[in-house]
Image (cartoon, rainbow, N blue to C red):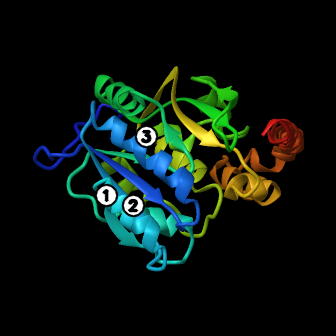
Amino acid sequence: MSTDKKRKFNSAPSNRILVVLPTLGDRLGTLRETLESIENQRKEVSLHLVVVAPNTAVEAREMAKKYGATIVDDPKTGISEAINRGIGVRTGEEFYAWMGDDDLFRPGGLLLLQQLLEGHPSAVVSYGACEYINPLGKVLATNSAGKLAQYLLPWGPDLIPHPGSMIRLDDLAAIGNFDPALKFAMDLDAFLKLRVRGKFVSTREVVSAFRWHPDSLTVANRRNSSLESELVKARHLPRWIKPLRFVWQYPIRWASALAARSVSRQA
C-alpha cells in the first residue's frame, strides 16, 4: 500500500486525540499526577480521555471523572484488551496516545506529536524522547534514540516509548489494534505491523516520562518481558533470517538487562 495514500476521516471531531489510560486504581497518588499532566495538554490540543478501570476501583473512577474522563470497565483479560476497550469508545478522533497511571506527559508533548503527524501525511506513528523518573519524579535517564529506534525495532531493543508515541487511529484499527495475547510487548508488535503502512517520524525533544519503580509491570517482569519481545520480533522477521536471530538475540538481552539494572539501582 502506498505511503502517500489519501486518508479518510469522519467529519472533523471536536476531539482529535484519544488518550487511553488503563488503571487498577491502586496508585491514586501517581494517578492524580498523571491526570493532571493530561489535563495540562488540553491547553494546546483537543483530546478525549478514556480511563479503563475495574468496577472496584471506586476512588480512581471518581477521580478520573473529575478530569472529564470517559470511564470504561476493565475486561480483566489483560492490559492489551483493556487498551482495546478504551479505543473502542472512539468517537471520530484521528490520533491515539497511551498513558500509564504512573507516567506523565511533559508540557507540549501531545501537541508536538500531533504536529509531527500533521506535517507528514504519509506517517502513521510519531514519537519523542522519554525520561525515566524514579517514584519521586527525579529524572534518572532519558531515552532520546530518535531515528535510530526505527532501525533497531525489528531486531534490537524497542526504544520507541509507548507513553511517548502517537498513532493514527485508522491505521491502528487496520492492524486489529493490540494483540490480546500479549502482556508486555503489545506496543512492539503493533509498531512492527504499522511499519508496512507508513513512515515513522520522531523528535529528540522530551514529550513524556516513564516512572521506574519495582512494581511497574515491565520492570518487575523484566525477563518475561524480554522473552515475549523476542518472540514478537521473531514472528516479524523474514523466514530466511529467523535461524540467525540467536547471533544478536542473547547479546541484546544481556545489554538490555544490564541497562535496566543500572536504572533500577538509581531508582
| Residue located 37% across and 66% down the image | 62
**As drawn, is 123 to the left or to the right of 254?**
left
**As drawn, is 233 to the left or to the right of 52?**
right
The furthest residue to the left? 11
The crowd level at tag 3 (other Cα within 10 Å; few <14, some 14-19, many 20+) is some
**As drawn, is 59 to the left or to the right of 144?**
left
Contact, CB < 8 Å: mark 3 with mark 1? no
What residue is disc 3 on? 37
- Is there any visible trace of residue 69 in the rendered image? no
Distance Cα–Cα, label 3 vs label 1: 14 Å
- Is there any visible trace of residue 180 in the rendered image? yes
- Residue 241 x %, y %: 75, 44
| Labelled disc at residue 66 | 1
Callout 2: helix, strand or loop?
Answer: helix
Distance Cα–Cα, label 1 vs label 2: 5 Å
| Residue located 67% across and 55% down the image | 232
Amino acid residing under circle 2: Met
What residue is disc 2 on? 63
Q: Nearer the viewer, residue 188 or 74?
A: 74
Distance Cα–Cα, label 2 vs label 3: 14 Å
- Residue 98 x %, y %: 46, 49
Callout 1: helix, strand or loop?
Answer: helix
Q: How many marks?
A: 3
Contact, CB < 8 Å: mark 2 with mark 3? no
| Labelled disc at residue 116 | none
Callout 3: helix, strand or loop?
Answer: helix
